[in-house]
Image: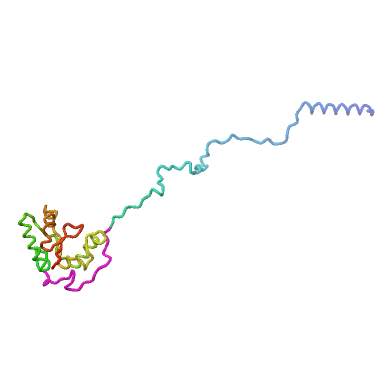
Amino acid sequence: MITFEAFLKEASFNVAASTSRNTRLPQKSTTPVAQTFPVQTTPHPLQPIVPPAVTQQNIPTSNIVPATQAQPAAVPAQPAAPTTIAKTAPGQNGRLTAGQLAQVEPGHFLTPTAANSFQQMKAAAAKDGVNLNINNAYRSYENQVKMANQYGLYSKGGKAAVPGTSNHGLGKAVDLNVKANPGSFEWLKSNASKYSFYNIPREPWHWEVRTA
């Protein structure tokens, strides 16, 4: 039979032995250790590649033309169309009848009085070795409209009178080929007034009789 003292002694021994074992052997942890993986540095074959964000710094500007430099295409200037057109009746400006005209050169007509004056002037010029050749004489109303549309009005810097007001339409004016006949313009300036023909500014080819 174990005495009480022996029991206490044996119990103390067991406690000491247990403490010694716990000190020498570390207890196994029951807490799970987190597993680590290497950082992926290249995209997975199935992983979409996101392009870099577009910023003002990485936009090329060499081909960008500022809005202030853009210029519209130039539009060719068109002759000014007549703004007013005088209406004429048969026998009036641009609508003269055959009985009101006389042929002064093949295909060219003036009033009989203007035609006679021109023939006298032409003959006098020929004696001085100058040729006076007509490019245009009487002009119909319709042809004057075409001239005004093509060359613009004389009053606006063009070359044509308002249709219905031109001396060509009255059979009193001629356009002479002064470029093809050297000396003709100088001769006309000195002699045309003797035959009642006068020039108008800006048109060395245009001569009109003022008495017929």
The residue shown at (26%, 63%) is 81
In depth, the one of 70 and 143 nearer the eye is 143
Q: Is residue 210 left or right of residue 68?
A: left
In depth, the one of 27 and 196 nearer the eye is 196
Q: Is residue 174 magenta?
A: no
Q: Is residue 47 left or right of residue 81?
A: right
Q: Is residue 85 magenta?
A: yes
Dominant secondary structure, magenta: loop
From the viewer's perspective, is residue 102 above or below residue 59?
below
**Which quarter shows the C terminus?**
bottom left
**Residue 150 in which image quadrant:** bottom left
Expressed as whole percent of the image width and height from the top left, the position of residue 58 reads 47, 41
Expressed as whole percent of the image width and height from the top left, the position of residue 76 reads 29, 55
Q: Is residue 52 left or right of residue 208?
A: right
Expressed as whole percent of the image width and height from the top left, the position of residue 202 reads 21, 57
How many numbered markers are drawn?
Answer: 0
Magenta region: 78-101
In depth, the one of 102 and 212 nearer the eye is 212
